[in-house]
Amino acid sequence: MGKMSMAIWTATSLSFVTFAASLSLQQRFFGIDVLAGDGTSLPDGSTQALRMRGEGTQNYECQQNSDGTYGWALQYPLAYLWLYDSDGNVDTTATPDGMHYFANIGSGAGWDLGTNCDPGTTINDRACDTYTARWRGTSPVADPQNGTIAWLLVEKDENNMAPMVEENGAAAFNEFWMYNWMQRLDTEGGSASGTCESASDVGQTSASAYTCDYILAFTAISFAHEAEVATPDNCFQALPLYGVGVQEYQFWDGSWLLSQPIATLVAYSTKTGDVVADGIVGSHFFANVGDSGTAGSGAGWVVGADCSGSSCGTQAGAFRGVLDTAVANPEAGNIALLLVDRDDANTAAANNALYQYDWMQRLLTQDGVAPDYNGTQGERFQSNYTCAYVLSLCVEVPDPVVTFVDGLAEYTTVTGPVVDNWCWYDNAMTA
């Protein structure tokens, strides 16, 4: 599949209601606030989103420089990774969640998550039994530190990673694809030690123990949409998927009824907004295919490897939806724009990479409408379409703090959104 140019969103901050302490929705959702340096602070619109503890070695070799001097050159890191929990704690005595490494001597920084991950003792003997995520970085910017390795800000290297992790003949949905930046912070140790001063030292190696925090960062996205299909104010667009396929209709008793969608889901680049060539990550379906005068129902989306219809060879996540709002596309000839709520009754929480998302929007629809002629009874018609399916994350809105003064109460919150134009008279709320 060739590259499909769909640069339709930009990495800018979203518009949302004002929050206490000026925290963005993204900052409130991910709940991470680790101090960085001048050179390693995140660009505007990006937010610390996933924090890992790294523990291992930085491995150096003594080399002669082009100017004739000698110095230690970093060859590769070998480190285990542990995820912090939602309370900001990490247990480095538990089984590691992943590993950090270089793909090549001196370059190709990579971070993998999976089961039974082991970075090994050399650059080429790392392995996980199964993989769930991979992130590759490039163009590091350093904040030097005294007595320890530098803090770093590393940019996502989309040329050397993919929406699917493929390893050992297996593929898995890459749960790190949505992150644009990596910070290495709170470093301890890792500096080369030993003598590297003359030709006789060339080839000597140094393995220096270190620890640090690795923090992946999410960059805000913004897909334009009609107000009628906007998510609630406490939600933000987080994971866009490009849908391409058909809307299948059946003619019955004088009208065309939607029987089912049959669509492939493709990842967007989180850096350019283009659809990723060969970036297939899932499928879209109806759990109940319409037939004989009954329209289809049970909208679902799945991500994983080798997905078709409602199942995948290896499934990473599923989202089942209930229609909240439909509005006509202002451009005639295109299927409606939709706002879809998560169907908790049919969406499993366990082992589901998509369960954290509360809403799905169908936006930027192209084609997919039913025929404008009368068919024969039972006739089926497949109408090609494309669109953006955009999943949103939502911040929990805390209960309000209400203060009564002379029978008048004002609605305020300590950490939640400020909601204007609401007040209470005689303990009753009115607008």
Image (tube, rainbow, N blue to C red):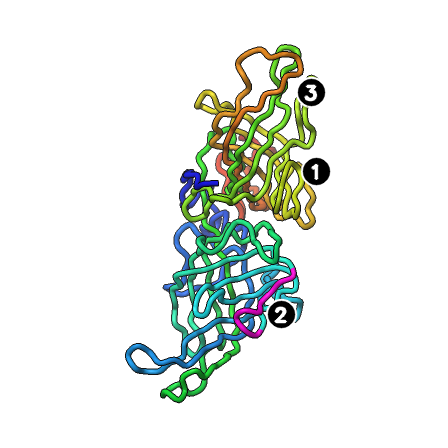
Q: Earlier in the sequence, mark 3 or mark 1?
A: 3
Mark 1 crowdedness (10 Å alpha carbons): few <14, some 14-19, many ≥20: some
Residue closest to the far left: 67
Residue 9 in the image: above or below residue 155: above
Q: Hey, what amino acid is under mark 2?
A: Thr
Residue 182 or 285: which is nearer the viewer?
Answer: 285
Query: Which disc number belongs to residue 346?
Result: 1
Q: Hey, what amino acid is under mark 3?
A: Thr
Relative horizontal placement of residue 77, taking residue 291 as reference (left or right): left
Residue 103, image x, y percentages: 49, 64
| Residue bearing the label numbered 2 | 92
Identify the magenta region.
121-129
| Residue bearing the label numbered 3 | 294
Residue 342 or 162: which is nearer the viewer?
Answer: 162
Mark 3 crowdedness (10 Å alpha carbons): few <14, some 14-19, many ≥20: some
Q: Earlier in the sequence, mark 2 or mark 1?
A: 2
Query: Which disc number belongs to residue 48?
Result: none
Residue 255, image x, y percentages: 61, 13
Q: Earlier in the sequence, mark 3 or mark 2?
A: 2
Q: Hey, what amino acid is under mark 1?
A: Asn
Residue 89 occupies which quadrant of the picture? bottom right
Residue 128, image x, y percentages: 62, 63
Residue 423 in the image: above or below residue 33: above
Secondary structure under badge 2?
Answer: loop
Q: Is residue 115 visible?
A: yes
Residue 196 in the image: above or below residue 234: below
Which one is in front in this view, the residue at disc 3 or the one at disc 1? 3
Q: Is residue 123 magenta?
A: yes
Distance of label 3 from label 1 (alpha carbons): 21 Å
Residue 72, image x, y percentages: 40, 79
Secondary structure under badge 1?
Answer: helix
* Residue pictured at 49% horizontal, 34% vertical: 421
